Image (cartoon, rainbow, N blue to C red):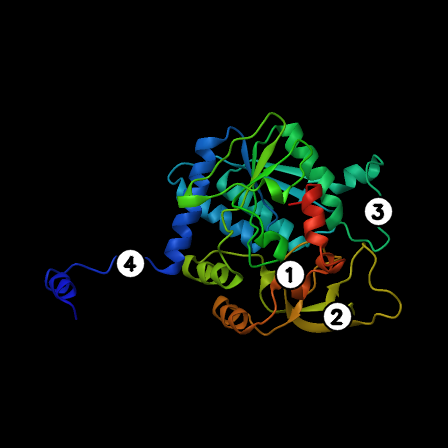
Amino acid sequence: MTAVEQVRRDAGVGDYRLSHLDALEAESAHVLREVVGEFERPVILFSGGKDSIVMLHLALKAFAPARPPFALLHVDTGHNFPEVLAYRDRVVAEHGLTLHVALVQDFLDRGQLTERPDGTRNPLQTVPLLDAITRNRFDAVLGGGRRDEEKARAKERIFSLRDAFGGWDPRRQRPELWSLYNGRHAAGEHVRVFPLSNWTELDVWQYVEREDVALPEIYYAHTREVFRRDGMWLTAGEWGGPRADEPVEHRRVRYRTVGDMSCTGAVDSDAATVAEVVAEVAASRLTERGATRADDKLSEAAMEDRKREGYF
């Protein structure tokens, strides 16, 4: 023990070093407050998935006892999990939040979008998203993207400038030294903000455990009717599955990530509690999107191509 440590112990001074979760929480809260200080009409992109739920939880803490100064925006593909939509509506009602919903189906009905042959609507979210941003004049859109999820997301800054068409240009990335964030943008442009950029999937689950954050039940092991397609267990639905050669099975599964039912796969699991999920994630060697998201497997650059067009 050093002399300084001895003095601190004798004086009854505690150890004030932050845990890694405390440090991540503090960074994210700082980002959220910076957004409120720099932008006029920020909004949280809220899907009812664990990352957007944690981001909302952080906002509730960062601005307590006041209500978070953010509305919520959900791009609804029409193929969402019912459990997630029910959770979304409960959270909005519980905290008295404003929810904007952009429906992919509306754009299909008007002929502005065309249904894909594979039934997947995740790639169709870009147009409704950009329409909602423009119509509501949102100048900062906060999302739960993390750098550990996918290589295109690893390239993006915490404050990510988007042009007047919602497109992302990696060459326009701004330096973020000393936790200084530049939200300057021209008329018609907006900024995407990622407060959880430096978190990992394991960090998120450890934080959920520590903070006792409620999540939709599909994140935990349950018995479900699923069928196998392209190496993933998918849930049957109006989007086009299963085919005649895809038998339905009852399996004990859970979801690591939540998106369109047509491209979000479940994983075999017996992890029915947060502690069990933490242990399972810690042992996994596959990222959640790499293991369970078919839309990211369309090409090597699938996510980056969509981000350049305006996708989150």
Decide: few, some or many residues near mark 2? Use Cα within 10 Å; few <14, some 14-19, many ≥20.
Answer: few
Position in image of residue 274 (x %, y %): 49, 66
Q: Nearer the viewer, mark 1 or mark 3?
A: 1
Q: Is residue 124 visible?
A: yes
Q: Amino acid at mark 1?
A: Arg
Query: Which residue is the site of mark 3?
Result: 115
| Residue 288, picture quadrant | bottom right
Label at residue 17 = 4
Q: Earlier in the sequence, mark 4 or mark 3?
A: 4
| Residue 167, picture quadrant | top right
Q: Amino acid at mark 4?
A: Arg
**Residue at image x 10%, y 64%?**
10
Position in image of residue 245 (x %, y %): 88, 70
Q: From the viewer's perspective, is residue 268 above or below residue 101?
A: below
Cα–Cα span, label 4 and label 2? 44 Å
Query: Which residue is the site of mark 1?
Result: 289
Q: Nearer the viewer, residue 173 or 260?
A: 173
Q: Earlier in the sequence, mark 1 or mark 4?
A: 4
**Image position of 188 (left or right of 230):** left
Cα–Cα span, label 2 and label 1? 13 Å
Query: Which residue is the site of mark 2?
Result: 231
Contact flag, marks 2 and 1 (Cβ < 8 Å): no
Q: Earlier in the sequence, mark 1 or mark 3?
A: 3
